[in-house]
C-alpha cells in the first residue's frame, strides 16, 4: 500500500519493532496526527478470542470520561410516554413504525446510534438487514435496548462507545481526538482497556491481549506493550 509524503515523514518517528509503554504511546500518537483536520485517535486491539465460538464473543459499551470529541446523533424507537421522554432527554430523532420505510426504502441513515425500548424490537427487527451490517442494531449488552431511554441517551451523548470483535477478532474503538490533551487520551484509553479486560471471556485460554495499537486517522500506528495493559 502506497502512503503519502506526510505519512512517510511521520512514520520515521515510530520504531516499528518497539512496544511502547501506554503513556509514551499516547504522547507519540498525538504527535503523529498532522493532518489539517482534527484526527480521531483509535485503539485497535487484537485478542486471543475465537469469535466463531459463542462463549468467546466480546460485546459491550463503556462511557469514556472525556467523551470521543464527536457529536453523536441518536435515533430512538419508542412510543407514547417513552417517546416523549426520549425527546426531552435530547434524542435527535424519535419515532416508531413510520421510520421503517424511510430507512429501508429511502436509505435514511443520518444517525450514529440507535436506541429502542424492548417493546419496539419487533419493529426494529425488520431493519436488521440494513442496521446490522452497519453496527447500528440496538443490543441489550450495549445498553441500547432499554426502558431507561433518558440514561441511554445521556451516556451516549457523554461519550459512550461500543466495543465488539470484528471477523478477525480485533476490536476497533475511538478514544478521542488529536486535539485532546495527553491526559484526556490516557484516561479514555485506560478506561477502555479496563472495560475490555473485564469483558474477557472465561473460555479464552493463554494470552488475551495479543496486540494493541494506537493510530490517528491518517497516520501510522504505535504498538503498545500489552503486558502493561493487563
Image (cartoon, grey):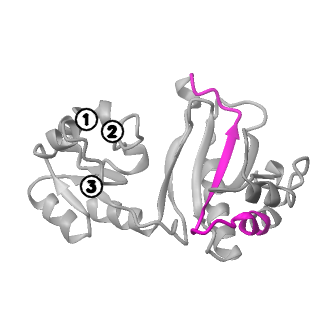
Decide if residue 206 is in sight here: yes
- Toward the viewer: 137 or 9? 9
Image coords of residue 209 (percent x, y): 74, 42
Label 2 belongs to which residue?
131
- Toward the viewer: 61 or 23? 23
Crowd rating for badge 1 (residues with CA inside 10 Å; few <14, some 14–19, many 20+): some
Image coords of residue 157 (percent x, y): 39, 67
Label 3 belongs to which residue?
75
> Which label's residue is closer to the chain start, 3 or 1?
3
- Toward the viewer: 96 or 36? 36
Label 1 belongs to which residue?
127
Image coords of residue 177 (percent x, y): 59, 67
The answer to whether residue 224 is left or right of residue 149 is right
Q: CA distance from mark 1 to mark 2?
A: 6 Å
Residue at image location 74% in from the left, 53% down from the top: 220
Q: Give the residues drawn in magenta, as a range.
A: 27-52
Crowd rating for badge 2 (residues with CA inside 10 Å; few <14, some 14–19, many 20+): some
The answer to whether residue 65 is left or right of residue 100 is right
Amino acid at each position: 500500500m502506497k502512503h503519502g509524503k506526510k505519512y512517510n515523514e511521520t512514520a520515521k518517528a515510530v520504531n516499528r519493532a518497539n512496544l511502547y509503554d501506554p503513556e509514551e504511546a499516547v504522547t507519540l500518537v498525538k504527535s503523529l496526527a498532522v493532518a489539517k483536520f482534527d484526527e480521531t485517535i483509535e485503539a485497535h486491539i487484537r485478542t486471543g478470542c475465537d469469535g466463531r465460538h459463542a462463549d468467546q464473543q466480546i460485546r459491550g459499551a463503556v462511557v469514556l470520561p472525556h467523551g470521543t470529541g464527536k457529536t453523536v446523533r441518536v435515533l430512538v424507537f419508542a412510543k407514547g410516554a417513552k417517546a416523549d421522554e426520549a425527546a426531552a432527554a435530547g434524542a435527535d430523532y424519535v419515532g416508531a413504525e413510520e421510520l421503517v420505510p424511510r430507512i429501508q426504502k429511502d436509505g435514511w441513515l443520518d444517525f450514529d446510534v440507535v436506541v429502542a425500548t424492548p417493546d419496539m424490537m419487533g419493529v426494529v427487527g425488520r431493519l436488521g438487514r440494513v442496521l446490522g451490517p452497519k453496527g447500528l442494531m440496538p443490543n441489550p449488552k450495549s445498553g441500547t435496548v432499554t426502558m431507561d431511554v433518558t440514561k441511554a441517551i445521556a451516556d451516549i451523548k457523554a461519550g459512550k462507545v461500543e466495543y465488539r470483535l470484528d471477523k478477525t477478532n480485533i476490536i476497533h474503538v475511538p478514544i478521542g481526538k488529536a486535539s485532546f490533551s495527553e491526559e484526556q487520551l490516557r484516561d479514555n484509553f485506560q478506561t477502555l482497556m479496563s472495560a475490555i479486560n473485564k469483558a474477557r471471556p472465561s473460555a479464552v485460554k493463554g494470552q488475551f491481549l495479543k496486540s494493541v495499537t494506537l493510530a490517528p486517522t491518517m497516520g501510522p500506528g504505535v504498538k503498545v506493550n500489552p503486558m502493561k495493559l493487563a
